[in-house]
Image (cartoon, helix red, strand yellow):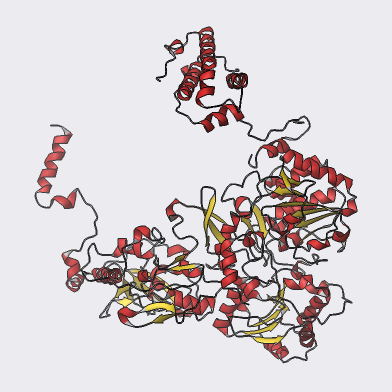
Amino acid sequence: MGLGVLASRATRLSGRGNPSRSLFYVRTIVTKPELQSPEASSAAAAPEPTPDLPPRTPLGGARVHFPNPDDAIEVFVDGYPVKIPKGMTVLQACEVAGVDIPRFCYHNRLSIAGNCRMCLVEVEKSPKPVASCAMPALPGMKIKTDTPIAKKAREGVMEFLLMNHPLDCPICDQGGECDLQDQSMAFGSDRGRFTEVKRSVVDKNLGPLVKTVMTRCIQCTRCVRFATEIAGVQDLGMLGRGSGEEIGTYVEKLMTSELSGNVIDICPVGALTSKPFAFKARNWELKGTETIDVTDAVGSNIRIDSRGPEVMRILPRLNEDINEEWISDKTRFFYDGLKRQRLNDPMIRGADGRFKVVSWRDALAVVAEVLHQAKAKEVVGVAGKLSDAESMMALKDFLNRMGTNNVWCEGNGPNPNADLRSGYIMNTGISGLEKADTFLLVGTQPRVEAAMVNARIRKTVRATNAKVGYIGPPTDFNYDHQHLGTGPETLLQIAEGRHPFCSEISNAKNPAIIVGAGVFEREDKDAIFAAVDTIVKKYGNVVRPDWNGFNVLLLNAAQAAALDLGLVPESSESIETAKFVYLMGADDINLDKIPNDAFVVYQGHHGDRSVYRANVILPASAFSEKEGTYENTEGCPQQTLPAVPTVGDARDDWKIIRALSEVAGVRLPYDTVSGIRSRIRTVAPNLLSLEEREQATFAASLKPEVKQKISSTPFKAAVENFYMTDPITRASKIMAQCSALLAKK
Amino acid sequence: MAFRLTGVRVAANSGSLEEARGRVFEFFKSACRSIPQIMEIYNLHDVISESQLRSNIASQFRRNAHITNPKGGRGLQVIDMLVFKGMEELGNIVEHAKQRHHIIGQYVVGQHGLVQDLNPKDDAISPFLNNFYKTNYS
């Protein structure tokens, strides 16, 4: 008798009773009789399961922080005991125990609404299933997440939600990353009892960024809570009751927040989707590259989703220290600028004033020849606001080898102070701002200069009622503030103790002073910083061993790294007498200052302002196409990674300078990125410890005395248009629409 | 028009280098014989002359000039395989299984692209610069 015959006999024998149970166990989603009458079955399963479970890992790296060890309570999740601090909700306790509770309305950065009912769990001795997101965990609570009652409750909620939800997943942009889709597969029933007509809701116009299909909305109110709590605009709200409930702007109005794009991410269904991304791609065909945003000095962590050579969309990445899980609208939607106005071939301006495409060999030969004709003192290099540390290092090394040190980064002003690192970075750190209880903003409008820093200040103001004093031109804030004055004389009054705000600073536990980088461009910059230093010294609580409240809020991604690398010009007037100007992506310098007979080389990725003045164009790669180090305003170096290939015949920035140096006969000694990094190690080693904030060691008290007089010119707004600040955003069509519709006039 | 190049069909494996060499020449001749027809089919008269096309084809042969073993390692018959691939390619071309831009891209413009440096002074430059002129990626 062979084995096969034996096996078939065994099958036949056992198959007589219940054929499907023993051998062919297939898990399907069905409604079983036990589920129809859950009370009876839970009563049947009365014997307590022994908590002999292996220790579970908390969900998503959830950490438990006990502010007070006495406040720890113990609850049981599915029989597994967990220790949690008092005040945590049942849902959070389940997360710590490693059980994922389905949810729609609950979001851990928003207030608790408890209206979707998806997170229902069974709690022993409670007559009904409880909404775990809104229920505080009590000592000894026995939570059951996997019982027939909980399962039936979820099935019921899913059935109600799907009753009015359209069946348009195939044409929905959320399809594939939709919470409702996933959870109906996991927790829903296999059939519905709904036969009537589905409800439909009129779509709302929320502006050029957010597309609405309101019929898909399940009224979780995450977007409403996000708008009021985090974005700080009261634009969205809930209208109507019952089945007539709708999300909408109360009046016909666009959503005017610089963070509005985040409602796309928090919407659990496809009601709010990205308008520029609509019907462009499916999310499963995209390649994600984890990289860094360069449109402001915050360095938000982003993921670039690309398909082939095209950037399709940009999403935020979680980084609690920098951007939490939000990004600004500029960061999210400027990517279409990466496809327009790109420079793709080396070009030389001919005698007729028109550009002619040439080979790299010819272009570099021409540049090198002109460079050698100019005197060393007449050579000037300017790095742009999007430059990475590697290329700035190469530019500085190259020009130093040519015998000049006239190299700087735009935005840092004519004579930047690169001596004391504490004088140009945000010493408190972005997440450190949450500890502050009084803010003094000097000449900075964080809402347009660094939207994520502004969100952090707003969070602090909301949580702790921190005081905010502001000196600068009238601007709008999305939190309570006192407008102290418009010019430096208010700063002097505070420094001399003649201002009512002085008592706020001296009474504060952790005061934070934030100076805007727009001050760098002022003539009396040193005097203003001296006045701020006086305030720091006068009120001893601003800078102490355990708290550094002196901050500079930078504007551009390149600024901090440029100052770390020492891109400081020899003389501030060098550009007026220049014969050879090398612009490495610098588009915001005053081109009128360049003399008419100067030879201008523009190396960059966009045909922006400086191209009109350039004699030679060397096409470079944008931040999405290269590996580069950027240091953000709090001094945290981070790296971009190439998401898409370069456009046309463009080359990476540092490679162009390295190649040019060889053609010019002053060959730089590095051929690879790692080579250039070891050169950076000798200049600014902190740029290589990625994602680690290096604190500035010396305080500003070491600064020499300043004899400059403060002028009475009021502070100016550093950023005129939030949506268009650099070559990429200026080339973006979406940003143009935004500035036409949303920018504050 | 069915494709027939009866003379050069690869029968059994080449027994020796001499035999393989003979086959290569046989195949090259048949390719040269097809040139007028190819010029006609793909309308190449205004982009290249017959002799230039012939020398381009010859240079593709010379790219493999260093292969001397009819039987490579582990019994791989490199030359026979290359001849077979070449015949396949020629067959496709003569059968009009390709389009004009395929021919222009591969046999008229060649590997170097449209922009060619007329006076390459590659004697003194570093490998980095050499690679830089070619591509952004190494």
Query: Where does the C terminus of chain A fall, quadrant-wise?
Result: bottom right
- How many labels were placed on the picture? 0
Residue A279 in view, yes or no:
yes
Query: Residue B128: horizontal and vertical position, in percent?
Result: 71, 38
Taking the image as drawn, is residue A668 in sight?
Answer: no
The residue located at (87%, 45%) in the rendering is: A372
Query: The N terminus of chain A is located in which quarter?
Result: top left
Q: Is residue A374 left or right of residue B71?
A: right
Q: Position of residue A161 (x, y in %)?
A: 30, 71
Q: Is residue A660 left or right of residue A77?
A: right
- Residue B12 found in image quarter: top left
Q: B136 left or right of A240?
A: right
Q: Position of residue B72 (x, y in %)?
A: 51, 17
Quarter residue A726 falls in? bottom right
Is the residue A423 above or below the residue A587 in the image?
Answer: below
Residue A551 rendering spot, x and y as whole percentages: 71, 74
Q: Nearer the viewer, residue A730 or A294?
A: A730
Rendered position, A739 above or below A238: above
